[in-house]
Image: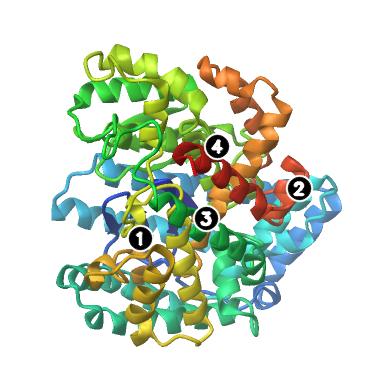
């Protein structure tokens, strides 16, 4: 059973994944300026633990006669699908408690060792219950025999089957090994990054690569390991599809960054000027303003709450109880403001999912990490970083910070929110334009690792070479290079591409929204966000996981699969104007 949480990271997000197992659940929280893994020695990010059956056929084959007869009788009565929905809802309800526990751990739980130990034990017990229900033999039989006819019901059974088969194929010893590596990997990574010593981390990384490849072979024997791992985060996506779209982005962005770097600053700003950072902005005033904007965007406080945490994220129990957190910096107004808008995008997706006939069903869940990211980035980048939003935002800032924004213009505000960093060294601090290259670098290395084309010991050298080639950056040490991200310490291969995919989906979806809503930009300038929000609710949120791939979803929403040209055109037009290229 997979429960997803999302946490913001500088124009991108990490979908915090809690995989429940008999061994334990893990919460991976990666944030803008710091990454942390909230887990324990009993945690596991693998595909579940406990008594696993290797294949679904074995599960069905070893089913008790009583259960098989019961399912057959239900099929005759036409109640099989209803019974399946009941069992799936039970699993989802239990998983929602795991989501609530994850939110509590990062916001309210005491920081002491005793609290952590108690929570770890409780989480492990809950995860074990969830896992056993997830591989229950009656559930397998219901999935195999359910025959709904409505398209969304068919998709619901398909999603349930995918999850069931994936869980059933992973043996307990592999899940236990993943649990051990999860904790050991994070601790080793923290120490190695602090010491700037890749050699201290490489043995654990080698174990993770071997384990993930073995796990992928069990899930999809004979298939490309990277594709299998990527599919866990972005259903239906493959390396071959990435090869069609990512090179187009790379060619465009490398050239565009080079031209931007030849300029000293955006045309509306003096060299070094930035009206949203470098000053002093009262944190309580920031929090009040950010909350007001979240509510104007449509965040429903009757179905969620907004708190402050060290590491911003969005989680909770489901559409009716969405927990959103953010953070603020006194010297950087944009951190809290855009961070809150980013998390609000995630929260609106969660609150907008189907909560009627498909409540607690697999088909009602968010499609993927990339699609979830598209909803946060659509609000953060396509809306909040647009000129129209600056028209809306500036009067709000003048009311909250009259002295600081007394003489600021809309053009200055918009330019300040869109400054391109030079140099761009750390991914989680990167801007909209340089961020794609950070993702492309990591994706290329991951594909090489999974296919055995890159040796782990060569990673630092290859990383530094690509950073120089793509961003003209000289890496000072491994802590600012190959060791800067937490993901590989937990075996999360295939995770990184979803960040860039989310940005690309957001762009294409927003373009479709503009065609459907002719007054959209004018509405944004006036602070009228309901038309866009409701359009997204109908076209993206409520569709949940009914599509087999994001391309299929985009065809429904925009009329065509993912088109890299839409993204590159957006970046080119925006930054050509901002920097007078």
Cα distance in 3D space between marks 4 and 1:
29 Å
Q: Is residue 404 above or below residue 429?
A: above
- Which quarter of the picture shows residue 64? bottom right
Disc 4 target residue: 349
Lateral position of residue 328 relative to residue 487, left or right: left
Q: Secondary structure at mark 3?
A: helix
Q: Nearer the viewer, residue 536 or 186?
A: 536
Crowd class of label 4 (few under 14; some 14 to 19; many from 20; radius 10 Å) = many
Crowd class of label 1 (few under 14; some 14 to 19; many from 20; radius 10 Å) = many
Q: Is residue 348 above or below residue 20?
A: above
Q: Secondary structure at mark 2?
A: helix
Q: Nearer the viewer, mark 1 or mark 2?
A: 2
- Which quarter of the picture shows residue 71? bottom right
Q: Nearer the viewer, mark 2 or mark 3?
A: 3
Disc 1 vs disc 2: Cβ atoms closer than 8 Å? no
Measuring from the top left, give residue 337's x and y in whole percent: 35, 31
Q: Earlier in the sequence, mark 4 or mark 1?
A: 1
Cα distance in 3D space between marks 4 and 2:
19 Å
Which numbered dot is residue 124? 1
Q: Nearer the viewer, residue 191 or 460?
A: 460
Disc 2 target residue: 555
Residue that appears at 67% across and 39% down: 358
Which numbered dot is residue 500? 3
Disc 3 vs disc 4: Cβ atoms closer than 8 Å? no
Measuring from the top left, give residue 575's x and y in whole percent: 49, 43
Disc 2 vs disc 3: Cβ atoms closer than 8 Å? no
Cα distance in 3D space between marks 3 and 1:
33 Å
Q: Secondary structure at mark 4?
A: helix
Q: Nearer the viewer, mark 3 or mark 1?
A: 3
Q: Nearer the viewer, mark 4 or mark 2?
A: 2
């Amino acid at each position: 059973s997979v429960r997803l949480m999302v946490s913001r990271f500088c124009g991108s997000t990490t979908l915090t994944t809690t995989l429940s197992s008999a061994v334990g659940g893990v919460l991976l929280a990666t944030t803008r300026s710091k990454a942390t893994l909230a887990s324990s020695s009993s945690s596991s990010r693998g595909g579940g633990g406990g008594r696993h059956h290797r294949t679904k056929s074995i599960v069905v084959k070893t089913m008790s006669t009583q259960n098989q007869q019961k399912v057959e009788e239900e099929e005759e009565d036409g109640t099989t699908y209803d019974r399946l929905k009941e069992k799936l809802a039970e699993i989802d309800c239990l998983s929602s408690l795991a989501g609530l526990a994850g939110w509590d751990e990062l916001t309210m739980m005491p920081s002491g060792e005793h609290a952590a130990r108690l929570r770890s034990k409780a989480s492990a017990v809950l995860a074990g219950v969830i896992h056993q229900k997830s591989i229950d033999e009656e559930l397998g039989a219901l999935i195999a025999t359910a025959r709904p006819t409505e398209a969304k019901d068919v998709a619901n059974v398909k999603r349930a089957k995918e999850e069931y088969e994936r869980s059933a194929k992973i043996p307990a010893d592999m899940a236990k090994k993943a649990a051990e590596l999860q904790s050991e990997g994070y601790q080793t990574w923290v120490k190695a990054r602090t010491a700037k010593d890749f050699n201290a981390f490489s043995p654990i990384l080698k174990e993770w690569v071997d384990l993930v490849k073995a796990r992928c072979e069990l899930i999809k024997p004979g298939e490309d390991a990277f594709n299998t791992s990527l599919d866990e985060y972005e259903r239906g996506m493959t390396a071959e599809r990435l090869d069609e779209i990512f090179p187009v982005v790379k060619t465009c962005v490398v050239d565009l960054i080079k031209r931007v770097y030849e300029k000293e600053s955006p045309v509306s700003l003096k060299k070094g000027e930035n009206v949203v950072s470098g000053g002093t902005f009262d944190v309580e005033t920031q929090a009040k303003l950010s909350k007001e904007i979240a509510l104007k965007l449509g965040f429903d406080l009757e179905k969620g709450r907004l708190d402050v945490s060290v590491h911003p994220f969005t989680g909770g129990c489901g559409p009716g109880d969405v927990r959103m957190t953010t953070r603020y910096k006194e010297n950087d107004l944009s951190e809290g403001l855009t961070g809150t808008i980013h998390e609000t995008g995630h929260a609106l997706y969660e609150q907008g999912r189907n909560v009627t006939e498909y409540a607690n069903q697999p088909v009602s869940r968010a499609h993927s990490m990339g699609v979830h990211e598209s909803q946060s980035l659509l609000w953060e980048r396509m809306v909040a970083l647009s000129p129209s939003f600056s028209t809306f935002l500036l009067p709000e800032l003048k009311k909250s910070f009259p002295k600081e924004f007394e003489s600021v213009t809309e053009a200055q505000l918009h330019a300040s929110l869109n400054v391109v960093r030079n140099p761009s060294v750390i991914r989680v601090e990167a801007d909209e334009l340089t961020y794609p290259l950070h993702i492309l670098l990591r994706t290329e290395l991951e594909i090489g690792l999974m296919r055995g084309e890159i040796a782990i010991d060569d990673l630092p050298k290859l990383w530094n070479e690509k950073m120089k080639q793509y961003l003209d950056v000289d890496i000072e040490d491994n802590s600012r290079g190959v060791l800067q991200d937490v993901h590989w310490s937990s075996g999360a291969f295939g995770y990184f591409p979803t960040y860039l995919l989310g940005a690309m989906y957001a762009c294409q979806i927003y373009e479709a929204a503009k065609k459907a809503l002719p007054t959209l930009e004018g509405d944004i300038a006036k602070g009228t966000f309901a038309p866009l929000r409701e359009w997204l609710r109908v076209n993206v949120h409520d569709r949940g996981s009914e599509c087999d791939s994001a391309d299929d979803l985009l065809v429904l929403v925009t009329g065509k699969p993912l088109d890299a040209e839409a993204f590159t055109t957006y970046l080119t037009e925006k930054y050509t104007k901002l920097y007078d290229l």
